[in-house]
Amino acid sequence: MYFVYVLECGDRSLYTGITTDLKRRFAEHQQGDGGHYTRARGAKKIVYTEKQPNRSSALKREAAIKRMSRAQKVALIG
């Protein structure tokens, strides 16, 4: 089971990623181990998650979300 997630960063930007363990991955982002983007902006909170059955579908969904405009992402988050 994979998760696609959207984080709100300290500068209110949105970051999209995938993981098999949301708790661990969010902790990595908060500690500055989650990648350059979130290290520079700070991970504030997870604002959206969805389950995907495998890595392939998670990567496809991540790519689709990353192509969305900010307004579309905000609508997705609800």
Image: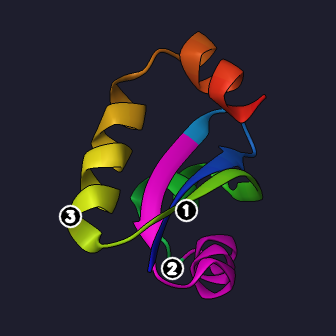
| Alpha carbon distance from label 3 to label 1 | 26 Å
* Quarter that holds the N terminus: bottom left
Residue hosting label 2: 33
Viewport quadrant of the C terminus: top right
Query: Residue 56 — which label?
Result: 3
Q: Position of residue 18 (x, y in %)?
A: 42, 64
**Secondary structure of the residue carrying numbered label 2:** loop
Range covered by the magenta-colored residues: 15-32
User: Between disc 1 and disc 2, whose residue precedes?
Assistant: 2
Asked if one can make out residue 12 in the rendered structure from this viewpoint, the answer is: no
Under circle 1, the secondary element is helix
Q: Which residue is mark 1?
A: 39
| Mark 2 in CB contact with mark 3 (< 8 angstroms) | no
Q: Is residue 42 left or right of residue 20?
A: right
Colouring mode (rainbow / by chain / secondary structure / one colour): rainbow
Badge number at residue 6: none
Give percent across and percent down for residue 45.
Answer: 79, 56
Q: Count residues near mark 1 (Cα–Cα under 10 Å), then give few for <14, some for 14-19, many for 20+.
A: some
Residue 46: x %, y % from top left: 73, 57
Could you tell me the amino acid type at mark 3? Ser
Residue found at the very far left of the displayed protein = 56
Q: Are marks 1 and 2 in contact (CB under 8 Å)?
A: yes
Which secondary structure lies at badge 3? helix
Name the quadrant containing residue 63: top left
